[in-house]
Image (tube, helix red, strand yellow):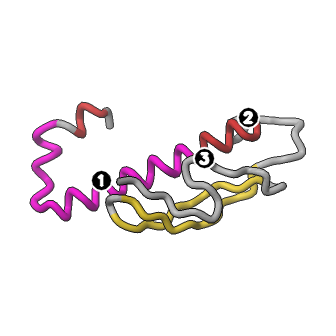
């Protein structure tokens, strides 16, 4: 779905309450944070997911982290690397993400 479609009257009519809209925006933010974290790990490792690399460090699944945002608290998947040297900028280790 393109950004213009999110802003169309037909799409926005589905939200009947502020809570419905807030929940939707929270889901969008959660997904965006997870994708940004994957991009950060790509940069840290020097290659994208599913690419070949000679590096000894590699992706090693995901951890879970609770984050607090202006849309409430949610649990995100944080990608990990094998040697645990990845320290994300957007959601640093041992800190909760806050957006005011």
Direction from residue 87 to residue 68 in the image, left or right:
left
Q: Earlier in the sequence, mark 2 or mark 1?
A: 1
Give the quadrant of the N terminus: top left
> Sequence-wise, which precedes: disc 3 or disc 2?
2
Magenta region includes residue 29: yes
Q: Nearer the viewer, residue 82 or 93?
A: 93
Q: Residue under circle 2? A: 47
**Disc sitting over residue 89 in the figure:** 3
Disc 2 versus disc 1: nearer the observer: 1
Mark in front: 3 vs 2: 3
Measure the C-alpha gap from mark 3 to mark 2.
18 Å
Mark 3 vs mark 1: in front: 3
Q: Are marks 3 and 1 in contact (CB under 8 Å)?
A: no
**Residue identifier under label 1:** 25
Q: Which residues are magenta?
A: 8-36
- Image side of residue 19 versus residue 89, left or right: left
Please state the horizontal and vertical placement of residue 62, each as a whole percent of the image.
65, 60
Neighbours of disc 2 within 10 Å: few (<14), some (14-19), many (20+): some
The single residue placed furthest to the front in the displayed view is 100
Residue under the image location 24 percent in, 31 percent down: 4
Q: Who's the residue at 73% across and 50% down the image?
A: 86
Q: Quadrant of residue 15?
A: bottom left
State the image quarter where residue 22 is shown: bottom left
Residue 16 on the magenta span: yes
Is 3 placed left or right of 7 in the picture?
right
Q: Secondary structure at mark 3?
A: loop
Residue that appears at 52% across and 51% down: 34
Placement of the C terminus among the 4 image quadrants = bottom left
């Amino acid at each position: 779905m393109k950004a213009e479609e999110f802003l169309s009257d037909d799409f926005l009519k589905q939200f009947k309450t502020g809570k419905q809209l807030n929940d939707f925006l929270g889901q969008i933010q959660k997904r965006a944070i997870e994708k940004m974290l994957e991009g950060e790990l790509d940069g840290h490792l020097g290659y994208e997911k599913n690419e070949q690399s000679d590096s000894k460090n590699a992706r090693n699944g995901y951890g879970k982290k609770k984050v607090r945002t202006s849309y409430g608290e949610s649990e995100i998947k944080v990608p990990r690397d094998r040697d645990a040297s990845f320290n994300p900028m957007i959601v640093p280790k041992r800190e909760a993400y806050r957006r005011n």
